[in-house]
Amino acid sequence: MKRGSIVLIVAQIANNDFHGFLPTRGSVMLDFVFVALFAVIPVMVWSIYLVKYRQVDQTHKCEWHKRIQLALAVILLVAVIAFEVDLRFITKDWRSLAEASPFYASQIVDYSLWIHLCFAVPTPLLWIFVIVRALKKFPKPAAPCEYSSRHIVWGRTAAGAMLMTAVTGWAFYWLAFVA
Ligand code: HEM
């Protein structure tokens, strides 16, 4: 993100102007998470593509996959913390921003949030599990080993959960703050 955008966001927070930088009803942080997921998903897909379609002698791609996944995990952790701080201390009441939505009164917004939470809550736990196991079991630098087959199963599950978190999060954002 450019320096100017960061200054703008900080100025908005200082001004108690909680409308974000997108032309929607979302707060700064809701907008930030909405946009951040568009960046995280392609990077995750690229990281998995890198390791899946490597040649047998290209084990350095495993190390790059490890670095990218660890970087994504840190970014996601920071986003989750910032998001929680925003909803608890800054925006506080997202419902007042969503009330204007034609999907609010019929509770479709609430249902979409519940569906989103079904993915958003277990996903970080799955990621922690996959990362902790991978760091323990793979050699350093990272390379295939007897643990590979299990990591592939859990890694695909964790990646799928992340994708569903993003898709359901975007749907909730659209229903609550765009429509
Ligand atoms: C949440 C984080 C991670 C996710 C979602 C993830 C996901 C995946 C997926 C889906 C594959 C299999 C690709 C395929 O062949 O279909 C894979 C392979 C691999 N990952 Fe991860 N990964 C993660 C973290 C890590 C970490 C931290 C390491 C290293 C310590 C690592 C090392 C590897 C290696 C070495 C392979 C290749 C296995 C082989 O083909 O024998 N991964 N990962």
Image (cartoon, helix red, strand yellow):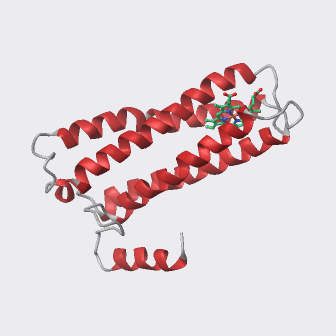
Q: Is residue 116 above or below residue 152?
A: below
- Number of numbered discs: 0
Q: Is residue 59 left or right of residue 158?
A: right
Residue 73, can we see it?
A: no
- Residue at point 67% right, 42% down? 47
Q: Position of residue 97 (x, y in %)?
A: 20, 59
Q: Position of residue 22 (x, y in %)?
A: 34, 66
Snapshot quadrant of residue 75: bottom right
Q: Is residue 2 above or below residue 31?
A: below
52 vs 134, nearest the viewer: 52
The outermost residue toward the right is 57
The outermost residue toward the left is 105
Q: Is residue 142 left or right of residue 52?
A: right
Q: Say which quadrant the N terminus sits in.
A: bottom right
Q: Is residue 25 left or right of residue 4?
A: left
- Residue at point 54% right, 78% down? 3
Residue 143, can we see it?
A: yes
- Residue at point 36% right, 57% down? 30
Snapshot quadrant of residue 129: top right
20 vs 48, nearest the viewer: 48
Q: Is residue 57 left or right of residue 130?
A: right
Ligand 1 positioned in quadrant: top right
- Residue at point 23% right, 51% down? 176
99 vs 138, nearest the viewer: 99
Snapshot quadrant of residue 98: bottom left
Q: Position of residue 82 (x, y in %)?
A: 44, 58
Q: Position of residue 168 (x, y in %)?
A: 36, 39
